[in-house]
Every structure is written in C-alpha cells, then in structure tokens.
Image: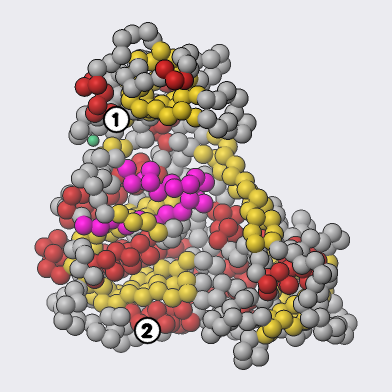
Amino acid sequence: MTREAPRAAGVRDIAVVAFAQTDHRRTSEEISEVEMLMPVLHEVMESTGLKTADIDFTCSGSSDYLAGRAFSFTLALDGVGAWPPISESHVEMDGAWALYEAWVKLRTGDADTALVYSYGKSSPGSVRDVLTRQLDPYYVAPLWPDSVALAALQAQALIDAGTADEPALAAVGARSRADAAANSHAQPRGPVPQGDYLVRPLRTGDCPPIGDGAAAVVLAAGERARDLCERPAWIRGIDHRIEAHGIGVRDLTDSPSTRLAAERAGAYERPVDTAELHAPFSSQEVILREVLGLDDGVRVNPSGGALAANPIMAAGLIRIGEAAARIHRGESDRALAHATSGPCLQQNLVAVLEGDPR
Amino acid sequence: MSAILTAPLTVEFPFTRSVGPVQSAFLTGLREQVLLGVRTGDGRVLVPPVEYDPVTAEEIRDLVEVAPTGTVTTWAWNHEPRRGQPLATPFAWVLVKLDGADTALLHALDAPGPDSVRTGARVRVRWAEERSGAITDIACFEPYDGEPVEPAGHTGEFADAITGIVAPARLDYTYSPGRAQTGYINALGGRRIVGERCPSCRKVYVPPRGACPTCGVATAEQVEVGPGGTVTTFCIVNIKAKNLDIEVPYVYAHIALDGAGLALHGRIAGIPYDQVRMGLRVEPVWTEGSRYPDHYRPTGEPDADYETYRETL
Ligand SMILES: [Zn+2]
C-alpha cells in the first residue's frame, strides 16, 4: 500500500487529471445509455487534449440489473471509440472501483493514462426493488427488503445509540441541498421539504434522489499528469474494504471497513480540508464523519453529495471527481473521497488526493 | 422528431440455488419449526448461520438450536409494503437477536403501529402454515411478552434435508431504446430500414445505436438502406428453439443491406437451406401486421461479387 511506501523507488505517482459528469435528472428516457454517456466522455477527453488512441487503459462501472439487460456495458462502450483496438475492463460496481482497477494498472507500469467512466439509469426500473437483488439470496433477498428499509434500520440503530436524532438527520439533508444550489449538475438544488416518512425514521429528505447520470475521469502517471493538467490531483493513497454481508452480524452504527480503508489510504496522517462522502442517506454521513474523524473545519460534500445527486454506479466516482476538481481549481490542497456499495455501508473505498504545494 | 418509444420489460427468473450443509440444516430446520445457528471457534452463535467464520474465515459446522423468541436490536416502520415483502399490511422491519444467538436475523414484525415497536422489544416467530425450507417459512415475528422458550437441543440432523431453494425474482422496467433506435423502429413500421451515418468514418450503422463504436462520436444523419442485401456469412440451425415455430434446419445469416456499412442478421427462407451461399442476393419479407421483417428471401438476382461485400464481413 501507498502508506508503507508513498514514493518508493519505481513507484509512480498517479493523478486524476480530468473529470466530467452529466446533469443528473430523474429521467432520461429520450436517450440511451451511450447517448447519455458520450458527451461526458468527449468533455473529459477534450479537457486533456487526449484522443482515444492516446488512452492506455479504459475501465467502466455499471449494472445490468439497472438496465434490465445482460452485458449492457458493451453497448455503452460504443461511446469510447474502440479503434484502434483498446485495452478495456469493466466492473459491475460503482465507477470508484473501476478507478481503483485503473489505478492498479497504472501502478504496475502497464499504462500511463486511463479513462474511467460509469453510468446508471435508474429511471427504467424501480431502484429500491433492483437493489434487493444484491442481497444474500438465501436469507435476505427472498424478503425483498428495499434499500430505504435497510438504511432505515441503520438510522434507527444510530438514534437508539444516541448519536443522532431526526432533526440532526434532517440538518444533514438540508445542508447538502443548500450546497447543491451551487452545483448545476445536481438534481434537487436548494431547499427541499423534509417530507413524509419513506420508511421510518427516514423521510424523503434523508434519502437520495433517484436519477440517471454518468461521470468520467482521466488518470495519468507521473510527468504525463503534469502535461495534461495544470494542477493534478495526486492519489496519495486508495484502499477499499468490505464487511460481513449479513447485516445482523455488523454493528450498524459503526463502519470499521471505512476506518481500515482510510487508515490504509493514509487519511489519518494529516488533516484533509475537503471530504466528498458517498452517503446516500443522511444517517450514513453521520457515521462516516465520526469514523473518518472529520471535524467542523473540514468542508464536507461542497457538491451537495449523494443527497443531491445519486446516479447509481456513478455517485462514488463523482465523489472522487468532485474532490479532484476542487484540487484542480485550487480550492483544496488535500481532499478525501469516499465511495460505498451494498446495503448499510457494506463496502467502502477511500482515496486521499493532494495538489502540489503552492 | 417523433416521440421516444417505450415498452414494458419484465425480467423474471426462478433462480435455483444449491445449499451447503449449514444452510441446508438451517433452512430444513425452518420447515420443521426448529431454529438453528452455528457456533464459531470463539463460542459465538451466528443466526442465520454461515459456513465460514466472518472473522477468521474458518469453516464452521457446529450447529446449535436457538429459541423462537428473541429481542429486537433495531427496527424501521414500513407503512407501504412493497411487492414480495413478508406482509401486505404495514409492518416493522426488524433485526432480531434470537435467545441463544449473538447475531441478528432480518425479518418482518407484525405490529399494530410504529408506536408499539421499540428496540429491546420481545418477539417470537410466527411460522408460515405451509413451509418448504426457506426463509419465508418464518411468516414474520409477533410481539411476545411470555417467558423465553427453551430450545430442545436439536442436532441439526434431518431425515430429508433440503438441498436447494428456488428463489423467484422479478423486476419490472419501462424500456426505452433512446433516440436512434426509436427512429429505426418507427421506420420499420413503415417498412423502411434506416441506419445512421458516422460523420467521421462515413460508415452507415444498421440498426443505429446513436454512436459510431469505432470513432466514439454521435451519429445523427439518417440514411435509408436496402431493401436488397447480400448474404455475407451464415449458419444452419439444426436445433428447434422452444416456443419458436420454425422448421429446422433453417439458415440464419449476416446480411449486408445495400448502402449499409455493416451486416445485420436475419433468417433466410424461400430457398432450400443447403443452397444458401455467401453472395446470395436477398430482400426482406414483411408479414401482415408485423413491425419488422419476418425473414429474407432470394431476389433472383445474380450473386454479388465478393469485392462488393468484403468490407462488411
Ligand atoms: Zn465512425
């Protein structure tokens, strides 16, 4: 891991050099996945001046269960422009994990540049039902507990533990949407009513909007990154960890996998000034803040976070992209990005990004 | 531009899953109204049981019976039950630590309202009337204020243990093919076949998907192709597909429609299967009321010269 040998001989520094995302919307039925994705791919490539032929490795994240079709990612690949033939891979996960795979590829020295993209259209189906299909198929999935119900169990555990109450959760949602007012890509922008219970204790304001969207990132190694970007966002560490799939085995008020991933990514070595947390539910932000030791001096989710735009499979990659973009713009010097997958923060990825000293 | 097409799409599958010895014991136990957990190396009892210790990854098989009574460790009130969930009336999702267990089981609690549920509440299993060896053999939990029920110490050995489950899954979608394919499908309705030309390499894609996969750019210029075309390659199908009313053997072919930059595929009829050949000139046959060609048949023209279709192979 990078923590043990941050810049040992032969180990290359890798940076996020470009980021683009769609405007995330409740529905995009007028366009196919590739039609939705293509402008984002063009934007991220144009900002680096790279052509497809210049990209050494391409990796994507998406889900057949959202699309309702097998091998759906192969159609989206049409948007990349696969001539001359490209080196390509796919994860049936959020794009943050596709970025992890690309980072590994760059670390090995097999590639100097990588294109990472992910997308998800939730509008064709019912995402609450779709996500039940990722659960343990023997003991849990036959009961069809939807994603909001599972998050609500976690929220109640947090309330019972005295860590949060409903007003505190509502404040997380309100702050996220207020911040999203400045983010033209976000779905609900500005104040939204806290609303009724979806599954008590979670109200609509505690839950993410359901939407369609896509995101793309370009990674580059060493001097190549400096050529492509004025202020690259160097990935100082990145790690991901998973917990037991049985949610009744876990302490739902804690996130030990996030803690371990953050430790291995070097997040605790020095304070960060920005954190983009993939917390689709208000209660999850409370847990993540605590685990990551983020105090009030850290700017958490200036983009509005997943409570303002949660395109499934892209929302985690967007956290890395948003954190990197703040470094690109000089608004952050050291940022933490987090992505999650699975019910109740089952899997967690943490990346630490830094800009060159100014 | 005409309205974007949409259509209902249902993905439904009865997943047949095998179970290992531990899952088999637990699920068979449910059928027999016996609740089993598994003991880890450090003495914890996991319910529902798993085959490998989540901490040490050691294989664990030491089954232990636990009580049908337990304590709610957290809950969430579900006032609008969704399809497939355990109860059709409002209920609480609960994690229940059964008496004798160290971990909690997810299920539903039948309770009159959210004010009657709390963490720490005592509950007991309500068994389903018909049980098959599945988690749904527990109909739900119900409030319980009696004494803990002592388990009988079942060994986990059953005469006719289940070896698998069938887990039906169904998801409903509203499929939309997007702009490019809507144009294609609408043209088919008028018995025309249209593709889209790549602005960069000038290739015409049929059916169009809105992007040139070679150049990675949007295609927009609609181009009518065919109706005539050339067989570029083919195979002879000898196995009858279920629910498909076509006599075997028949020929399935790649067909390069005139003006198209790549071949689409379709069935060839109107010629004995063993006379189909590369270069054969064909045209689509539309049946009454159909929105797409049923098959392609020979036009009677001389075979196309190889050089005219080699780029579409
Ligand atoms: Zn082209």
- For residue A263, the mark is 2
Q: Which of these two is toward me, A8 or A316?
A: A8
Dot 1: element? loop
Residue A259, x across and y down, in percent: 43, 82
Answer whether residue A61 is magenta in the image.
Answer: yes
Q: Residue at x 56, y 54 (%)?
A: A130
Which quadrant: the C terminus of chain B? top left
Q: Amino acid at mark 1?
A: Leu
The residues colored magenta run A56-78
Residue A309, x across and y down, in percent: 43, 58
Cβ atoms under marks 1 and 2 closer than 8 Å? no
Instruction: Identify residue for label 1.
Output: B313
Left or right: A242 as drawn, with respect to A231? right
Which quadrant: the N terminus of chain B? top left
Query: Mark 1: few, some, or many residues within 10 Å (few <14, many ≥20)?
Result: few
Q: Residue at x 51, y 51 (%)?
A: A65
Nearest-to-viewer mark from 1 and 2: 1
Residue A322, x across and y down, in percent: 31, 64
Distance between the alpha carbons at the discs numbered 1 and 2: 54 Å
